[in-house]
Every structure is written in C-alpha cells, then in structure tokens.
Image (cartoon, grey):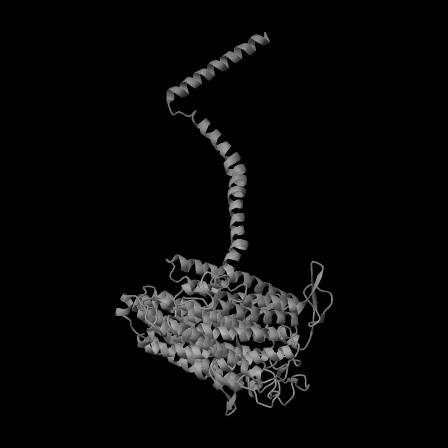
Amino acid sequence: MEPFVVLLPLFGALLAMPIARVGGPRAAEIVTTALLGLACIQAWFLFADVALGGNARTISLFTWISSGDFFADWAVRLDTLSAVMLVVVNTVSFLVHAYSIGYMHDDGGRPRFFAYLSLFTFAMLCLVTADNFLQLFFGWEGVGLASYLLIGFWFKKKSANDAAIKAFVVNRVGDFGFALGIFCVFYVFGSLRFDEVFSAVATNGVVTPWGASAGAPIRELTITFLNWDFHALTVMSVLLFIGAMGKSAQFLLHTWLPDAMEGPTPVSALIHAATMVTAGVFLVCRCSVFFEYAPDAAALVTLVGATTAFFAATVGLLQDDIKKIVAYSTCSQLGYMFFAAGVGAYGAAMFHLFTHAFFKALLFLGSGAVIHGMHHEQDIKKMGGVKSLLPLTHLLMVVGTIAITGVGIPELKIGGLPVGTAGFVSKDMILESAFAAGEAGKAFGYYAFALGILAAVMTAFYSWRLIFITFWGPSRLPEAVKKHPHDVPNVMLWPLVPLAIGALFAGMAFYKDFIGSNAAQFWNGALYSAADHASPAHESTDGRSHGAGAPDAAHEGTAGGEGERESAGAHEGGNEGGHENETLEFPGWVLWAPFWAMVFGTGAAAFQYLRGDPLKPGLLRPGGMIYAFLKNKWYFDEIYDFLLVKPALAIGRFLWIDGDGKTIDGVGPDGIASTVAASARRIVKVQSGYMYHYAFVMLVGIAALITFIFFRLGGAQ
C-alpha cells in the first residue's frame, strides 16, 4: 500500500483529461483533488509510522535498469527525511488543489491545469522517495518539466511563455552540474544506491574509482583532471550543490523565480511552499554525509545561502507586485535553510523547510485571494483599505506575516516547548546554529549569522509593508473595483485555515522531534552529523536557558545507511563516535538578536506606512542610486543579458547568417548546387516540344554526319 502515496497523484494526472471528456471539468477537479486528499492522509499515517514510530524501510518495486554490473531498482525509500517531505508535498498539494477549484473557476483549461498540478506532485514525490541518484534525477527532471508546463499554463500570454522558458533554461545550468555530480558519484563508487554510497563515506571505506589500479579511503581520495588533483568528496558535493542552487533559486541562479509568478497563483504556492524550490534543500540534507567530510563544499553552501538570504531580502523591500514580494521572501527563506545545512544543522534546515511550507503556502494563497477579490489587480500601491472589504483574507494574511517574521518570546519555554510562531522556532534555531558554527571556527558561520539577522530585519519590514499598504490606510482602489469587491468563496477559504494553524503552532508541536530532545530518535539515521560538530549550549554565559533555537540533542541524526552507525546521543550523552559532545557557551544577546531584528523591522514599517500617506518616499527615494540598485534587483537580469544572452545571440546570428548562410549555403546549395541547377535550366530550353524543331535538328545532324564522312573518305583516297 505504501507506493500508493506516490502513485495516487499520477493516477490523477492520467485521469484528469479523460474524465473531463466524460463528466466535464468539475469531475476532473473533484477526482484529482480527492486522490490528492487520499495521498495526504496516507502521508500523515506514514509520518506517524516511519518518523514517530521508527519503522523506516525501503520498498523495491522492480528492477529499472540492469546492464552488466550496474543495476538500479525503482524503489520507495521511507525514512524520516522522506516521510517529512511526503507530508509537506502532499498536504500543500491537496490544499492547493482544493483552492484551485475556486480560483480557476472561470478558466477554460481547468482539466489540463489539474492534470499538470498532479503531475508536478508526482514528480516531486518520486524525487523525495528515491533510493538512488538515478531515480532522484528522474524526479528532478520531472519537476522541471512540470514547472515549465505550469508557469507557462497561460501559453497565449507572451510573458508567461518567456517566464517558462527562462525557468527551464536557468535550471538546465544547475541540472548540468547535478548530472556531472551523479557521473562523479558513479565513477568513484561504481554504484548510485544511497545505502552503498553513504555507508562507504560514513565508514571511510576504501573505494576504487573506475579504471584506477588501486583504491583509497574515500575521505582522502582525489580525482585528477587536467593534471590537477581535487578532493573527490568536495567535487561531488559542489557539483550536486550546483544542481540544488538552480532548483532552489539560490544566488546567481535565482533569476527565474520572480518571473515564475506569471503562472496562476496556486502554481506559485505549490512551487514555493512544497515542491520545486525545496528540492535543493532536500538534496543537500539527503547527501549530508558528503558535506560533513567536504568542509570546502559546506563552506560554499553557507556562503551562498547567507548571501541569498540577504540579497533577496533587500530586493523584496521595493517590490510592488504582491506575488513578487512573497516570491523574494521565499528566495530569502531558502537561503536560511541552505546556510543551516552548510553549518551542519541539517535538522534545523529541514525544520524550517517544514514550517515554511505552512506560512508560505498561506501567504501565496492569501495573496491569490486578494488578487481574486480585487479583480486580478496585483499592484499593492493600487489597493489600500482592503481590510474592511476582505476581512477574513486580511486576518489570514496577518497570521502568515507574524509566522514568517518570527514572532515569539526568546528564552521562554512552557512544558519544554518554546513559545512562538512556526517561523520563530525554526529560524531562531538556524541563527543560533550559525553563531555556534562561527564560535567553533567553521567557515562563514559569523557571516551567515550577521546576514541572517539583517535579513530578519528586512523580512519583517517588507512583510508588514505588504500588509499596511494593501489592507490598511486610505483606499486607492479604482471605482470599478470599489463597487464589486468580494471576499473569497468558501472553497478558497477553508484550505487557508489548516495552513494558518500550522503557521502558528507547527513549530511548537514538532520542536522536540525535529531539533529537540527526541531529534536523534526522530531522524533515526536519515541525516548524518559528524562527531566534531558543535551545538548551541543549553545555558548562556549568564546562566539563562536558551530559547527556541537551542536543541536538546547535540546531533540531528546519523548516516543515511541502514543502521551502519548508531543514532546520535542526547545532549548529555555520547555521539556516534563515542566522544564527549562539544558544547559552546555564548551570550544571551544571541538569543534575543532575532527578536529585536523582528521588532525593529516591524516598527520601521509601521513608522513608514501608518503615518499619513503610505506611498510617500521613505529613506530610499526614487531616483537614488541605492533605490535603483534594489528596484532593478541588483541588475542581475541586465548583467546576464549583457554578458550571456546578447553574446550568445550575436554568436548564433553570426553562425546563422555568415556561417550557415554565406559559407555553407554559399559553397553548397547556393554554390555548386545552384550552378548545376542553372546549367540544367539552360539545357532544358533546348527541349522546346515542337516536332519540326526536332526534325530540323535531325536533318542538320544527318547533313553534318554525311559531310564528315565524305571528307574522311576523300582524305583517305
């Protein structure tokens, strides 16, 4: 029965169009949504059995590829990491399906839309339940294809087509690195199965790369390329991370994400909360054992993640499109997840992914409700005073906002649980882990902590800016919209309620399991944490207990194999290697820094947008250099257009006109071939078609022949 958690969305994708032909679009909507509902229920049961019950298992369905010594099964891997992702993907996808029944009510392509949604979900489920890198790559590319179809769903709209192509092309850059990483894994290990590969790294086993005469311990193994030696694990980790950068829209490969807002809003919610962009974080956590023994690669993950968190937050400050504000917040929050993984806090990274799914889906679907109620207007500067017109939507958006900004009380615990929203619990843990990594001498630990705090200030500012400009203050709505505003129908409203509950309470509810006292038992080998990793101490220098961020377990988990290593001990106990856990003490201000960042950002937004005209210029005035820099998103699109797009077009145009047109066609079709054709045309003119012409030519020929013969005979005599 377990494989059905993956297959039910596939059934929905395959049945949507045939059912629509028989029963109409509504039948397709109901069937696909019902199948996702069943998959969602099964995902939660599996979460209870696998993650909470400790019953991890792998179910092999069939041998997919068998060639010589290489074989790859198609399997469903059910460990805690997969179970968490099953819950995230299926829950959000089910709620998005239900929401879409109302949102897409007037669209003529509803069956196709629901088929694409289900296909998207199936591809992501294939990715998270993969038992080998090849199966994971299948799901990885399936997610890319489905996102292309959904972003460009309104294919008659040029901007949607352009956005879909941009997402597809930018992700090909990352996917090329990912494919090279998989080739490298196979070259070194001779296998793509997770258990075999991860176990070899965890035990520092001796491996013999393909074609090599002798093996070496994997952690010391080097790869020679162009007479340069590279650390094998670092090469593999960096290449795999390049793939993750593309899928998760990290710094330098982020440019596709804002443009993806051209798709319907439910698509944005699914991409940002549960599927495509979370795939990169999942990949890094799945391969945690690689990064633990490739410190340079881990430092790169930290650097890119922290930079992304800061960059996206700065750009979000000046966005006016309601969906793009939320989109840049996704990019920033993904940066938090990556630098958490980079400093070794994989449990915190996955916890933030889990909590982020609730409040990000809530914010996107809430934004869709605003757009629906405002007759498809997306510019927040053309709204204002919407609170009284859309009261329920306003309330739910406020819930999502206090979750993403991290409202909570540091250092206060009730029953061993922190007091705060989901974003407070998970994000604070990430920031504390980054500071602890800096204290332990980890590369870019302090850098990540500092940029994370700055990003937290800006997150609070632009999140409340959206609320204040959209819902509060004087109305700036056009008269046509003022006459017919409406809150969303119930079919669009009820999916937001469970998301709001999760945004408020998921952090407290699952704190102990993800990063607390039950973490080692909860992860049960799905994540790996090397014994030399430092973890935040329970007590600060002034004796106060830590707040939401401090874990009660020193390590999140152990190797990704099937029991090769013992689970990590509790904070007071031993770790995998049997050594005493290293703890760090740091001042209490570290615990309060995220809180004051949230307060400062919120206060600045209130000061700017709740006094007088909310659209009056603030510190960053239009026309200034910094304003233009942020408004134009650090000019990445312009830079890429100048450095990559225009040169590529110029080269392509040169090869087309001069290379193919003048050289190849000039010598070939337009040269020799055209000469032969011209000669043939001249010769053809001799064939006039008149009998007397042919008779005359024959007579001339006979006369010439007779004359020739007489002359020959005369000469012979």
Q: Would you identify the image quadrant in which residue 713 lies?
A: top right
Q: In this view, does 338 lie to the left or right of 470?
A: right
State the residue lying farthest toward the right: 214
Q: Which of 310 and 261 is in front in this view?
A: 310
In what quadrant of the picture does the C terminus appear?
Answer: top right
* Residue 702 seen in render: yes
Does residue 242 appear left or right of residue 477 in this picture?
right
Q: Where does residue 462 sit, x and y in percent of width and height?
A: 45, 72
Farthest front residue?
Answer: 612
Whole-percent x and y of residue 520? 58, 85
- In the rendered image, residue 391, in percent from the top left (x then y), is placed at 33, 78
Residue under the image location 66 percent in, 79 percent down: 440
Q: In this view, does 108 lie to the left or right of 299?
A: left
469, 647: nearer the viewer: 469
Q: In this view, does 638 lie above or below 242?
A: above
Residue drawn at (47%, 13%), measured in percent from left and top? 703
Depicted 538 relative to depicted 277: above or below = below
- Quadrant in which residue 565 is drawn: bottom right
